[in-house]
Image (spheres, helix red, strand yellow):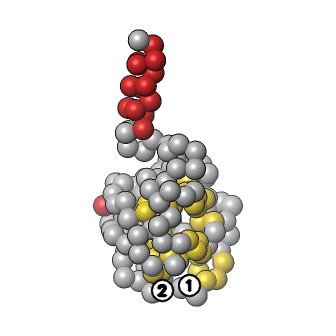
Amino acid sequence: MKRFAFACALLLCACTPGAMPAQGGSSGGGAVTTIDVNLTQHAPTQTPQGTSAGYAPAITTVPVGSAIRFTNSDGFAHTATLIPNATSFPAGSVFDASALTQKGSAISGSWTSGTMSAGASSQILTVDRAGTYLYGCFYHYGAPMRGVIVAQ
């Protein structure tokens, strides 16, 4: 009976949104690439798309079929939100309040981590299509808290 209860508890945790996957687990069968979110530690750097800061690495290159997760190691709340159809960072923020609520599971779709408090992680995003994806923070876009994902 104890084994049954333990197995049920384990299954419930595995199905809970935001729960951590098993070690090395991801939707693509490989490791999950983690992008660190920390405005106080990741200084501005130049990328081909414009100035990036707050995310490390500034440009994350991953293969199609892999997975990405954002983890907030900062003491402030942040988001990681797709800037749709962008080839360079817009001068001003393009985000509205919808960026504050987590949505999306594929890198090629509309996605946002929603508000990640200190120590929190985003949902896992499946890298489903090759391309260059720009994203930024709703709260600190002008800081300039922005990053790039290159899926190959």
User: In which quarter of the view is residue 23 placed?
Assistant: top right
Mark 2 to mark 1: distance in Å?
6 Å
Q: Which residue is drawn at 43% across and 60% down?
A: 125
The first of marks 2 and 1 along the sequence is 1
Q: Which quarter of the figure is the N terminus placed in? A: top left
User: In which quarter of the view is residue 129 placed?
Assistant: bottom left
User: In which quarter of the view is residue 98 placed?
Assistant: bottom left
Question: In this picture, is 11 found above or below 83?
Answer: above
> Decide: marks 2, 1 in contact (CB < 8 A)?
yes
**Residue located farthest toward the top when viewing the structure as drawn:** 1
Q: Which residue is drawn at 65% across and 74% down?
A: 44
Question: In this picture, is 90 found above or below 97?
Answer: below
In the rendered image, which residue does mark 1 sit on?
A: 50
Label 1 residue SS: strand
Q: Residue at x 61, y 52 (%)?
A: 74
**Residue 91 at least partly seen:** no
Label 2 residue SS: loop
Callout 2 amino acid: Ser
Tell me if mark 2 has few (under 14), some (14-19) or many (20+) residues whose alpha carbon lies within 10 angstroms of its own: some
Total number of numbered labels? 2
Callout 1 amino acid: Gly
- Image position of 17 (left or right of 50): left
Q: Which mark is residue 88?
A: 2
Residue 101 place in picture, x, y as percent: 34, 54
Could you say which is closer to the camera, residue 130 or residue 85? 130
Residue 11 place in picture, x, y as percent: 40, 32
